[in-house]
DNA sequence: CGTTTGTTTGAAATAACTCAACGGGAGTGG
DNA sequence: CCACTCCCGTTGAGTTATTTCAAACAAACG
């Protein structure tokens, strides 16, 4: 979505880790753009199981759909300390739902998240734990690249193993074991919140069986 | 999507089971509306694993997104013998991408599939085989209701256990065992291509832990 | 310095998978 | 009408992937 970010109405501020940008059923009158840090949208089952359904990285707009529905509806939480800009919804809405071109650009953005969801349905439904984690790590690096956070396949990775578990749909203990293996095979290194792809080709092979 | 279906340009015809409505990378100049029968969109991994990512039931438009991309891109196959109407894409496109209201209705339709995908990400990521199957069966009945195919919780269910497996992301053998259990507990009956919800409340409880 | 949060490890339990075989039913060709 | 095949559902036995529980440890935090 093309949204200028330098207007007076755009407030920039900080959010502490674990604070919510949105809660279940909550109405909102603004849209967030992540300037720095990571956030996610998730679902919680009554017994405590959690599934993360979207990650928001620096540069991402947080839940473009809000523009349409005017509701957040589902919880969004900061996975790290966060720096966000807040954009009044009416401002975007004026541009994106009352004008044809804006609408079109928004459609594009939604189509993009649709594609992403489809990919994850395949991952969750038909790939092994190792494949899912490799696919995720590969994805993360590619998504971080545009924001300049990746230097020679080395980048920040602030997710805990619990977070990873709730993205790829396995237990955190098993995440740990898969990561051990990948480290042992020299595919990645992951420590102190930083990820290195030591063997990107192998990572891609393990995680990204291209669909036929 | 609101599309009138009684125009001369709308051709209606039959498609045999296992025939493809679309193939990988295929361009298309028409949109399908399922009049009768079931179809699905799927992804195939190189080693043969299949994940179904969308089901199309009577009354559904098959892949509304085509209107935008002009490409099918991913395979869509008939799961039963099918009766479809074919609508020239340019006709819909004229209405839906060059006019504001049409665009809006299309957005709504896409938002709907987005919601669906999110739900399935949670199911695939965090629910057990039994929960997924119950959720699916419940969903199917609700989706068939508008087309009048459900009489007192009894409806057609032409999916094979292989199909079910590829929707819920488990093996067909395991699908069989879960179904056995559900039958044994008197929750459903499923035979000769027909499904009965004998205990809808229990089915909902098993499959539909509402998200918090 | 004590507390909390996140990672690592082991051992046992369970969910789901694979392989293999059998049987019924529906279609097909003779 | 029969024999044949293929598809689909069913079942059993053995295996593998993943989970759970529990504990120990390390790093970060106030």
Image (tube, coloured by chain):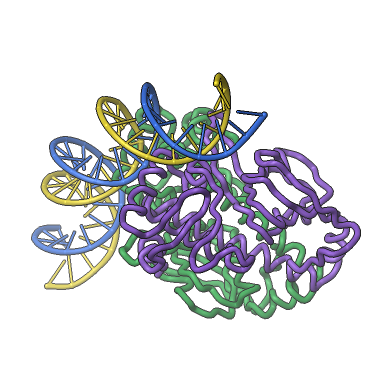
Chain colours: A purple, B green, C yellow, D blue
Image coords of residue B18 (percent x, y): 38, 66
Question: Seen in the image, is A106 located left or right of residue A179?
Answer: right
Question: Seen in the image, is A192 located left or right of residue D21?
Answer: right
Question: Seen in the image, is B89 located left or right of residue B82?
Answer: right
Q: Kindly identify the residue that appears in the image at 55 percent across and 65 percent down.
A: A150
Image coords of residue B172 (percent x, y): 32, 48
Q: Using the rendered image of the protein, determine whether residue B137 is visible from the camera's viewpoint.
A: no
Could you say which quadrant of the image residue A51 lies in? Answer: top right
- Foreground pick, B89 / A9: A9
Q: Kindly identify the residue that appears in the image at 43 percent across and 43 percent down.
A: A170
| Figure disc tally | 0
- Foreground pick, B188 / B155: B188
Could you say which quadrant of the image residue A78 lies in? Answer: top right
- Foreground pick, C21 / B65: B65
Identify the image quadrant of the N terminus of chain B.
Answer: bottom right
Image coords of residue A123 (percent x, y): 44, 55
Q: Kindly identify the residue that appears in the image at 52 percent across and 43 percent down.
A: A160
Identify the image quadrant of the C terminus of chain B.
Answer: top right
Question: Seen in the image, is A161 located left or right of residue B191?
Answer: right
Image coords of residue D28 (percent x, y): 57, 39
Q: Using the rendered image of the protein, determine whether residue B210 is visible from the camera's viewpoint.
A: yes
- Foreground pick, C27 / B38: B38
């Amino acid at each position: 979505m093309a949204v200028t970010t330098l207007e007076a109405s755009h407030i920039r501020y900080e959010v502490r880790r674990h604070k919510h940008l949105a809660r279940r059923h909550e109405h909102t009158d603004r849209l967030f753009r992540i300037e720095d840090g990571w956030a996610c949208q998730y679902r919680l089952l009554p017994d405590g199981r959690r599934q993360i359904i979207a990650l928001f990285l620096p540069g991402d707009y947080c839940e473009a759909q809000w523009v349409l529905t005017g509701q957040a509806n589902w919880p969004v939480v900061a996975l790290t300390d966060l720096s966000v800009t807040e954009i009044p919804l009416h401002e975007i809405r004026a541009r994106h739902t009352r004008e044809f071109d804006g609408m079109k650009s928004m459609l594009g953005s939604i189509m993009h998240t649709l594609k992403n969801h489809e990919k994850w349905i395949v991952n969750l439904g038909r790939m092994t734990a190792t494949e899912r984690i490799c696919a995720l790590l590969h994805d993360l690096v590619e998504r971080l690249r545009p924001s300049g956070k990746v230097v020679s396949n080395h980048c920040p990775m602030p997710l805990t193993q619990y977070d990873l578990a709730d993205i790829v749909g396995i237990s955190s203990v098993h995440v740990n074991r898969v990561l051990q293996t990948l480290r042992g095979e020299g595919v990645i290194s992951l420590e102190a919140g930083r990820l290195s792809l030591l063997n990107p080709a192998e990572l891609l092979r393990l995680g990204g069986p291209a669909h036929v």
